[in-house]
Amino acid sequence: MNIPHTPPDAVPPGAGSLDPALLQARLRLRTEVEIGHNPAKPGGTSVVEDRLRGKFFEIGNRERNIIEQFDGTRTVAEIASGLPAGGADPAELQAQNVQTVLSIAQWLIQQNLAVIADGDNTTRLLNQFRVMENQRTLALINVLCVKFTLLNPSHLLEKSRGLAQILFHPLCALAWCVLALVALGVCVGRWDEIAGGYAGILSGYRWVWLLLAWVGLKVVHESGHALACYRYGGRVTQAGVLLLLFTPMAWVDVSSCWKFNSRWQRIVVSFAGMYFELAIAFAAIIAWSMLPASSAVRDICFNVFLMASVTTVLFNANPLMRFDGYFMLTDSINIVNLYTKGQMWVRSLWSRIFFGIALPTGSPQSNAGPTERAMVPVYGILAAVWRLLIGVSLIIAASAMFYGAGILLALVAGVCWYGVPVAKSMTKMIAAAQSDSVNWRRFGTSLTVVLAVIAGCGWLLQSPATQSAPAVVRLKDERVMRAVQDGFVVNVCVRDGQAVVAGQPLVVLNNDELLLTVRKLEFELEASRTTARSLLERRELSRWQSEIDNQTKLQAQLLEHRTTLDQLTIRAPFDGIVFCREIDSLPGRYIPQGQPVLTLARNNSLEIVASLDQDNSSAIARVSANPVKAVFSGVPVTLCNVSAIRPRADIHPAHPALCVPAGGPLAVRPKAQNSEDGGQRESEFELLSPRFNIELQIPPAASSQLAPGQTGRVIFASQRHSLGVWGWISLTDWIRSKFRLATSAR
């Protein structure tokens, strides 16, 4: 995800309420403003560039002819009178010319593109400065999305001129296509392995490496945009970091690509980031297919492939967000500012329906075609819905961060993203009401209809007939094999998933100190026996008896230590299957006493355990009365009967795979438990709120398709409510869970 470049703003068809005082003003374009012709669009357009601020504006031919006349020698009224006024009603056309020139003049001043040649511009510039400062303040307050400028990459791009020529050469593009075909063949041939490879991608410390890889990929992505822009003659003067939900993302300003006469060059600039990232993704998946399964580099390659392909396509190629896909779309269909025009159309529709205010919706250019008139409404509605969904999703995600402390961040983001725009809209509506332009009767009628529809849906429509709960596959009878004595692993006799028999060695540990103690006791025992024989030969019976007692003690100690030494070889207590994901990393590892080494489970002892929140205890009766549906990825939906329900809810997770640290849905907190000898053993987790565990029988046909630790959901009948009551219950449960998360963290 990135911000590749700022699109050119458009000259609005109207600049709000016009100021007649400007008719006698003499306007002059600022010296930093340039106007260039753009023949790429049918009918021809021009791009106005503010070189000082790095902003671009697209105008039509008629607007360009008018703007070029603002040279400070003539007033706005004189320029308007010089326009042609022929036709059936010259007076009406002349009035329209005055309105057009006055609108463009006011827009030039608002955008700080022109100054009044014979006037004091201080007040206007100060007002614009205050507006910009307010925008910067709002941007800083919204901590969910913060943008920083770090450097000017121009000198680095100058040194990379030759590299840019090579990377965007047709032969290099052909090599990219060949690499893509090879990677596609790998994906098709090993799709099952790839589809299931994402499981546990964030478990343990993998997220640290993923974050580092993410940052590197985003730097490469933005470097692609910068190199492409520089390759075709553009300027790149700013680069920095964007923090979205505290996730770092790079960005570069390649707005100068709007000066390119060729829209295909602009498309290349927009695609260049994905061009670079996808090349890395293709190389990573090919390397993944060649490396051995036990290689750590293989896992890294797979994770890089996922981030450089899936996330790039989902975010950057999405045309509903103003990222790479959006700019590629607008250039390919020759509609600049599609997003802005679409939002203008949506706002106009909203104002017309609810307030009876006719806002301008037409294209700012005089040559808008039927394609643009058809695309703008459709795109505006889709983009508005998508923006609402993304905003709400980010706010919900932020509320779950930092053990619930993110609720404050979510409130700040909600105010910045929705509160401030709504406040501005209300201010404009109040101002319009004072000028009697708001149709309050229409507003009241429309609002009543909307509320009636919402109330009717909430009262008449029914909630879903089912609900679900997280579930996990686990083994009924399993035993955690722990180290009886401290030691280093010298031999691993089994592999993960291997079937073993009772008494079979599993893992062999070594403890040099214990071995030396055994050898010392053996030496002392042998010396005691020699001494006892000597004493008996000399008839020193009292000393001989003492030595015999010493031998008895030494033999007892030796037997105890030999037993402990034998226990360093961990053996299977029964026939079963070994489970240990990190078994390949055990050799050479130091295992302290009491620490788990691996898990042994009896064969054919799988069951499904569903975890149901205690607040939903009323659903237990419905679960126990009817079979429930178990839904697991890659397995057909299975009907399961309930075998047991725990009578009390507790805070112990049914399985570690259900916990958030392992990628599960249940929030937990660490809990240090005491071992039998009074010391501390490994850190475990406890749930933030008690839950019921419901055990389900797995049909024999589905048992072979499920694996221990596999997570999914169970679906069961739900009590029916009206949609409004169901929504209220869901909302209060969600707020309660967030509050519990915030107050239970420690």
Image (tube, rainbow, N blue to C red):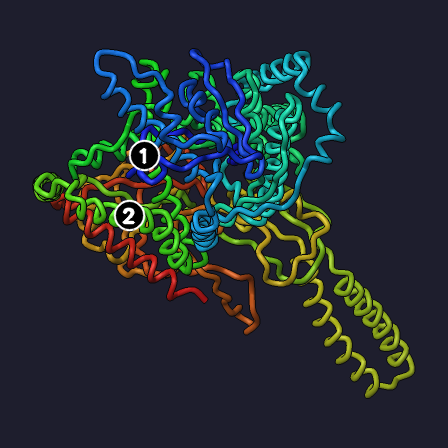
- Classify residue 154 as left or right of residue 94: right
Determine which residue is flagged by label 2: 422
Q: Position of residue 385 (x, y in %)?
A: 30, 34
**Residue drawn at 32 percent across, 53 percent down:** 693
**Residue sitting nearer the eye, 472 or 273:** 273
Q: Nearer the viewer, residue 76 or 406?
A: 76
Q: Is residue 304 left or right of residue 119?
A: right
Residue 98: percent from the left, percent from the top?
31, 27
In this rendered view, identify the residue nearer to me: 204 or 583. 204
Q: Residue at x 73, y 50 (%)?
A: 588
First in residue order: circle 1 vs circle 2: 1
* Secondary structure found at label 1: helix
Residue position for label 1: 384
Distance CA(mark 1)–CA(mark 2): 15 Å
* Residue in the picture at 56% in, 47% down: 148
402 or 44: nearer the viewer: 44
Q: Report the amino acid beneath label 1.
A: Ala
Residue type at tag 2? Val
Vertical order, 75 against 670 (above or below): above
Coordinates of residue 408 in the picture (x, y in percent): 39, 59
